[in-house]
Image (cartoon, rainbow, N blue to C red):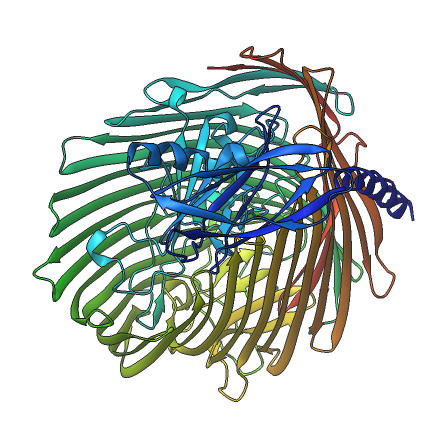
């Protein structure tokens, strides 16, 4: 009950602060133009007359109505304004005895447009079509450090747990500063690095399309971009911050350091951004996951065409620290971004990223195998190093309004190494295992897009994209126990069993298509698509054993793996070809408040594999429909429905039939006879962003049915697994149901947030020649209350509940994580700021076999005298010196509960100089 008492204490403090602010009246009214028409999205600002400080503001709804709350015992100046109109001012005195009242405004058109610029600057929120412009100073109190702190306080905007910006529930795809790309393809780098005090305005660009002539032709409703407008003092000048710090961790008696210079320059002609970060305190600016998901702005080719085929990236199953928490983390990060306007027609831009992370992960796991009933406990120590490099160059040529040509090239290369020591105990067996993994992949992705407007009726778009990828993962396992007895022809007369695997995968993928948009009228258009996807991959692998005398024993043959005498080869030399030629037609029409976009795409698929002196080839014709419907209830509220059928094809990794190691106790062999799976996807979404009462609601339901899915046919003996992919019978489809909802509302200076995400997944697998059903039911709930007062201390108080229920072939487990949390910041003695955050975890399971409670407390004390550029900080992380955290996971073969050890308490002294 200790955490409940903590919640009650913080809650009492929060109630006291809220109560102190609650003595107010409600003022309502309308804002209309001179002929009596209501003005939607007009602003009204209430300023304290004696100080001219902004007390509050409001935005009118579609009826021109506003509503604001005014604290008592003050006199206010009310300013009503709207783009293109002269502002109107009125005064009101709110006494202790004052009651709710009404005050209307009439605005007249501006005679001088220069005044319009000044008005826009003062408006907290301005709506221009699909663009929402936030004046940052209207929402901040001065304690914000980074862009992410600013974004959290804007109505309708959130920062998720990964640091990405979300608007109305949709993840932002592009961040720009002064109209120039900021590390295209990732909003996390912006939220974590752009200084908050440089931000003047935030422009949210909904229904975004960076090609002018393509706007409105397709369905861009899920495309969101952010443009940051800088304050005048930050333009044409270098700005940023130089941060350095040192500290100590008494638990492991290790010195700690932090160096983070960040520099930015923006002018109309060019921009430069430099971000560096060197530390060993667990702050990871660019993770292994970030690298693999970072696209550099490249989007899925023909995403509405009905084919899902991706060239996978082999990561060898490298361990990844949960929430970037590990027993040791050392990061080195350097990134640069530039843009340059060569002339009025040509812009070039690009970025480079270098990252070097050293991670030590220590964990204890309990794994329950479904088919065999075996329970394996492991104690692992994992040392990993990830050296990552990425370079992107882009050019955009726009000689006139009718033509635009874009070129992008993204080069990615990396080197990942991992040394893992594991003690495995299962049944009565004990096995000491040393594993080594290394891979040095690189890829080049090039993209050329051209857009041409022939006339007002005919618009053409062409896209060509080529990917070249080369991977060479190496795997080594040294075990005390004989691995895969009876399957691998291993020399058993050895003190230890040293098994090694070489593997290379080379991939070429070429995508090309041409779109013709024929505009029928202002309400409808036709879209004809002709295109093709072609992929050629080679896959080579071999397994060898290093004997005690240092010689190599190549495993070229294998013994039968079952009683029927089936055998599987051990050397891969595979060529895999995939081709998809398609012709599509989509019709978009607007009818009243509805927008309908039905479509059909005809596909011709050709698959061919060459391996083991045999060629296998299949050809398939199919027609795939899709439908998108949008119901615009009003400008800020809509319902969307989407249905699609898609063919899913896998790459060469699932077709190469010779066995390869996935882990010390997992072998995997492909299947040349695999066919595609077919997925039916239904999505229904609701969005409502109401600036009148600052309420943001979005909800969604989705259902996916996957037929003939590619699944693993797995034979499990004790903890050893041999798997091969097969198409599961269509009578056993995979099904996934998902429901999510978010609600946020700002009342006065308090923001309320509620969210829920529930997912039910049912799947079937063939394990030991038996079809088994697996079910996963996950529930995630979150609620919080956050204040944003200018002077008083500010709080965020919240609660998370995660429930994970796994039913694997009759073995059912349920895990609960209750997580109350609190954030606090306060200014005191004029120049000091203190902030702290507390996260409590209560991790249990339904069977009362696991119970763990732990907390994380981080705190910072800042000192900055007046407007001095120098800032000093005392920083403490993991103040309670928590030793470990818990996690649970699920797949069709086993359930796993893991305990991760984390960084100890770290105390730092940090100095920052603001440029």
Nearest the eye: 152 or 273: 152
Image position of 449 (left or right of 127): left
Q: In the rendered view, would you say 644 is above or below 268? A: below
Residue placed furthest toward the front: 35
Residue appearing at x 29%, y 43% in the figure: 410
Q: In the rendered view, would you say 60 is above or below 438? A: below
User: Does the image show residue 875?
Assistant: no
Across and down, in percent, residue 779 comes to 68, 64
Across and down, in percent, residue 507 comes to 30, 55
Nearest the eye: 94 or 165: 94
Across and down, in percent, residue 372 comes to 71, 72
Residue appearing at x 7%, y 60% in the figure: 454
Q: In the rendered view, would you say 550 is above or below 376? A: above
Nearest the eye: 878 or 250: 878
Residue placed furthest toward the bottom: 731
Across and down, in percent, residue 561 comes to 55, 73
Nearest the eye: 114 or 9: 114
Report which quarter residue 428 is drawn in: bottom right
How many marks overall?
A: 0
User: Does the image show residue 313?
Assistant: yes
């Amino acid at each position: 009950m200790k955490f409940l008492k903590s919640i009650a204490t913080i809650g009492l403090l929060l109630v006291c602060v809220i109560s102190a602010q609650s003595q107010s009246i409600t003022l309502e009214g309308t804002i209309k133009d001179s002929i009596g028409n209501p003005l939607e999205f007009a602003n009204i600002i209430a300023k304290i007359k004696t100080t001219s400080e902004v007390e509050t503001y409001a935005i009118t709804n579609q009826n021109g109505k506003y509503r604001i709350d005014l604290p008592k015992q003050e006199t206010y100046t009310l300013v009503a304004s709207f783009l293109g109109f002269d502002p109107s001012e009125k005064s009101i005195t709110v006494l202790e005895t004052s009651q709710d009242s009404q005050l209307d405004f009439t605005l007249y058109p501006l005679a001088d447009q220069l005044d319009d610029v000044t008005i826009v600057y003062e408006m907290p929120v301005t709506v221009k079509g699909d663009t929402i412009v936030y004046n940052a100073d209207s929402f901040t109190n001065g304690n914000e450090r980074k862009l992410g702190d600013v974004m959290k306080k804007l109505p309708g905007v959130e920062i998720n747990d990964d640091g990405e910006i979300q608007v109305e529930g949709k993840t932002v795809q592009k961040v720009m500063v002064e109209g120039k790309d900021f590390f295209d393809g990732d909003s996390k780098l912006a939220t974590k690095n752009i200084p908050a005090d440089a931000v003047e305005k935030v422009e949210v660009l909904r229904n975004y399309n960076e090609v002018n002539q393509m706007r409105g032709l397709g369905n861009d409703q899920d495309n969101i971009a952010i443009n940051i407008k800088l304050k005048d003092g930050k333009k044409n000048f270098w700005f940023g911050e130089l941060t350095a710090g040192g500290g100590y961790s008494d638990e492991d008696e290790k010195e700690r350091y932090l160096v983070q210079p960040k520099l930015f320059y923006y002018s109309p002609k060019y921009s430069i951004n430099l971000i560096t970060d060197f530390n060993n305190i667990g702050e990871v600016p660019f993770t292994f996951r970030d690298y693999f998901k970072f696209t550099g702005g490249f989007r899925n080719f023909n995403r509405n065409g009905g084919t899902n085929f991706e060239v996978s990236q082999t990561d060898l199953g490298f361990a990844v620290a949960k929430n970037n928490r590990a027993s040791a983390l050392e990061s080195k990060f350097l990134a640069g971004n530039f843009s340059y306007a060569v002339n009025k027609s040509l812009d070039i831009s690009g970025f480079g990223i270098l990252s070097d992370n050293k991670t030590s992960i220590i964990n204890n796991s309990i794994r329950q195998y479904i088919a065999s009933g075996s329970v394996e406990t492991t104690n692992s120590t994992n040392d990993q190093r990830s050296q990552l490099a990425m370079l992107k160059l882009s050019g955009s040529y726009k000689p006139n309004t009718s033509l635009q040509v874009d070129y992008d090239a993204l080069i990615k290369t990396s080197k990942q190494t991992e040394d893992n020591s594991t003690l495995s105990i299962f049944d009565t067996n004990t096995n000491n295992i040393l594993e080594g993994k290394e891979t040095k992949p690189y890829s080049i992705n090039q993209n050329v897009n051209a857009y041409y407007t022939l006339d007002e009726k005919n618009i053409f778009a062409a896209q060509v994209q080529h990917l070249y990828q080369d991977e060479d993962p190496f795997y080594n396992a040294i075990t005390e126990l004989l691995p895969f007895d009876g399957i691998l022809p291993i020399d058993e007369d050895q003190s230890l069993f040293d098994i090694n695997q070489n593997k290379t995968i080379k991939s070429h993928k070429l995508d090309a298509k041409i779109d013709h948009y024929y505009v029928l009228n202002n309400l409808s258009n036709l879209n004809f698509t002709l295109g093709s996807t072609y992929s050629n991959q080679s896959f080579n692998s071999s397994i060898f054993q290093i004997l005690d005398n240092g010689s190599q024993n190549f495993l070229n043959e294998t013994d039968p793996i079952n009683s029927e005498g089936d055998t599987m080869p051990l050397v891969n030399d595979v060529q895999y070809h995939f081709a998809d030629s398609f012709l599509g037609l989509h019709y978009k029409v607007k009818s009243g408040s509805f927008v309908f976009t039905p479509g059909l795409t005809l596909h011709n698929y050709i698959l061919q594999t060459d391996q083991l002196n045999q060629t296998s080839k299949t050809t398939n014709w199919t027609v795939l429909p899709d439908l998108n419907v949008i119901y615009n209830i009003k400008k800020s509220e809509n319902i969307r429905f989407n249905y699609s059928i898609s063919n899913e094809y896998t790459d060469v990794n699932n077709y190469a039939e010779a066995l390869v190691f996935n882990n010390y106790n997992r072998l995997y062999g492909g299947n040349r006879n695999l066919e595609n799976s077919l997925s039916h996807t239904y999505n229904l979404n609701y969005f409502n962003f109401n600036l009148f009462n600052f309420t943001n609601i979005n909800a969604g339901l989705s259902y996916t049915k996957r037929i003939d899915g590619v699944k693993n046919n797995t034979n499990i003996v004790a903890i050893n697994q041999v798997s091969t992919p097969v198409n599961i019978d269509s009578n056993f489809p995979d099904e996934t149901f998902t429901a999510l909802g978010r609600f946020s509302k700002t009342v006065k200076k308090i923001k309320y947030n509620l969210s829920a995400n529930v997912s039910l997944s049912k799947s079937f697998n063939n394990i030991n020649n038996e079809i088994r059903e697996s079910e996963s039911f996950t529930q995630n709930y979150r609620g919080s209350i956050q204040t944003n007062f200018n002077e008083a201390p500010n709080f965020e108080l919240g609660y998370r509940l995660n429930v994970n229920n796994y039913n694997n072939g009759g073995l059912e487990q349920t895990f609960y994580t209750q997580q109350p949390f609190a954030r606090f910041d306060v200014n005191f003695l004029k120049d000091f700021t203190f902030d702290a955050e507390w996260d409590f975890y209560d991790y249990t399971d339904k069977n009362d076999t696991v119970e763990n409670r732990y907390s994380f407390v981080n705190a910072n004390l800042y000192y900055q005298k007046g407007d001095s550029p120098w800032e000093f900080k005392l920083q403490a992380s993991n103040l309670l010196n928590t030793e470990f955290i818990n996690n649970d996971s699920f797949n069709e073969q086993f359930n796993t509960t893991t305990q991760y050890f984390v960084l100890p308490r770290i105390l730092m002294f940090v100095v920052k100089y603001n440029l």
